Image: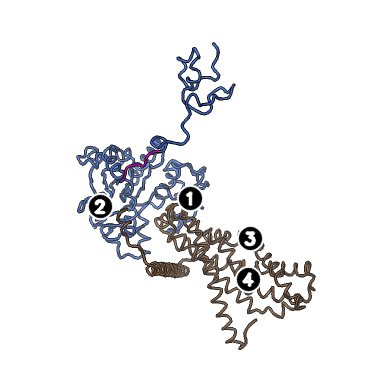
Chain colours: A brown, B blue
Amino acid sequence: MSGTLLTRPRATLIQALGAAVLSVVELVGDMALFAVQTLLWIPRRIPRGHVLWPVMYEIGVQSVPVITVTGAFIGMVLAVQTYEQFAMLHMENQLGAVINVSLVKELGPVLAGVMLAGRLGGAIAAELGTMKITEQIDALTALGANPVAYLAVPRFIACCLLIPLLTVIANVAGMASGWWFSVQVLGIDSHFYWFHTEGFVAPWDYWTGLLKSVCFGGCIAMIACHRGFHCRAGAEGVGRAATEAFVYSFVAILAADFLIGTWMMKLYHALWGVTPL
Amino acid sequence: MNADTPIVELRQVSKSFGTQAVLRHVSLHVRRGETVVIIGESGCGKSVTLKLLLRLLRPSSGEVLWDGRSIAGWSERQLAEERLRFGFLFQMAALFDSLSVYENVAFGLRQNTRLDEERIQQIVFDRLRSVGLAPGIVGPKKPAELSGGMRKRVGLARALALDPEVILYDEPTTGLDPIMSDVINELILQTRRERGVTSIIVTHDMQTVRKVPERVVMLYPVARLQPGEPQVIFDGPPGEAFRSKDPRVSQFVRGEAGARLKELSALARPASPPLPRRDHDVPTLIPPPTPETRSPPPTGFPYHPFDATPVRSWTSNDSNSASESSCWRRWPPSDG
């Protein structure tokens, strides 16, 4: 055994690079197949209420406090960071426009998604990973339940439905805190704050943000369930699954944000012939 | 299908995980109503065999047959339906943490039948009572609140809920005290007696091997087999296993580690001589204290605080020193 290890030729840089690329392709392909399998199960067997409600409670209701706090701080940080620059140009009355556009279109969905990737992605991967290593997933199969239908589908539905709602909560909290900080601390007139907000924030921005959050929710659920189902044995395996769920979800959120942002801008341009703000 | 058709069968089945072969061309059949125990060293593939029989794992090669029909081409739906003929008691019971004991036992019924809640409750209570648990007390509890023996019994109740024809037990008595192990053995016998089920039991417990089965199958680890040697090294009644002339079988069932210890020590023999131990072979810069250099312990402290060696040297002038060889005598020595 040890002889085999000692005589094994060292991989060249090209071989190591090729192996890394192959493993990434394999992982992405496996996740895509898992996603297709999950999506195919949705129409075949809608999860029953007693399975779906606890998952929705855990994913939705339990996340409200943390997402409200996140949103509130995003709004205030935006106010602090943009005030100085706008004040130099004597445009501080337009602070509401930049805070609220950034919030609903970009920062609200992305930062809420990242926060939920940490909270939910890790929790889902750890829960399913523990079920996997304690043979509970085998027990589901033995009792006639399909593990993907019973475990992954409710989490996917809950994430796709509730993460946009949580993003709306984060947006509202951010808008309220940004307005409060701008008016009460920075001394900006409330009327002009909302007047400029109305002028710059269009329904298109809301829908772009919401579409992003639906995709983020789907990515978080799929990646976390996939990592949970492929968890390795032991505490280390569960920890690794939870970490991977967060890291991969984070990367997926940023990639999806870039792609959706680009496509939505092209779509806007195609529909109205001008570039959105 | 005639009466002699095995209810489950492995035909030339091999299973590997990556490069590690666990099963190699294993053939095994179990007839209806039979109770078979599978024994063998840890890692020889016993639990994998059980999971292959229930198709929780796919064989790398070979065939699994249920009632003489190969299940290789079956759809997931067909497999899920046919699997309900089997009950599986997992090694650590594998109860669903998030559900109560009642919900665990009711799980299969809710998932696969359209029975009303009243009927489900009757079945759940009946199964919990049949494994010696009080449904009113245990039913609302979560699995984390149960002892190991209770978890195994709830696992058995869950496996029995759908009235299976075959029950697979994966180490049912592991980690339990002798009394609870015997309770589980009796429950296996009682289940067979009352329900006429076929039982396949993986165990390391020789008490179970003596008491429960009609037939014992012993697997040997692939890594220690000679090329071409079968992995099933014994298949017969339990009495014969204890009288077997094959030392691998007889030593295993008697729990004799002699030959295995020799193998292990041969594997563990170091390739190069051991490094000298510092305290014995290498001179140290600071020599260990001698009776002359060692400072006496503080006055008034009842026992020598640092060393477990006799303190006679300090008290060599003491008239009582000859009788005080123990290091735990009082310090300072009494005058009398």
Alpha carbon separation for disc pair 1 and 4: 51 Å
Marks 4,2: beta carbons within 8 A: no
Q: Which residue is mark 3?
A: A66
* Foreground: disc 4 or disc 2: 4
Give the quarter of the image for residue B267. Answer: top left
- Disc 4 on helix, strand or loop? helix
Q: Which residues are magenta?
A: B272-277
Q: Pick whichever of labels 3 and 4 is earlier in the sequence.
A: 3
Mark 2 vs mark 3: give the one in front.
Answer: 3
Q: Which residue is mark 2?
A: B28
Measuring from the top left, give residue B84's x and y in whole percent.
37, 56
Quick check: B98 left or right of B47?
A: right
> Marks 1 and 3: CB-CB under 8 Å?
no
Q: Which residue is mark 4?
A: A107
Rate crowding at label 3 as few (under 14), some (14 to 19) or many (20 or more) other CA atoms within 10 Å. Answer: some
At 57% across and 77% down in the image, what residue appears? Answer: A261
Instruction: Residue B174: say if magenta.
Output: no
Amino acid residing under circle 4: Leu
Q: Which mark is residue B121?
A: 1
In the foreground, B2 or A260: A260
Q: Position of residue B196 (x, y in %)?
A: 32, 47
A242 left or right of B213 in image: right
Q: Is residue B276 magenta?
A: yes
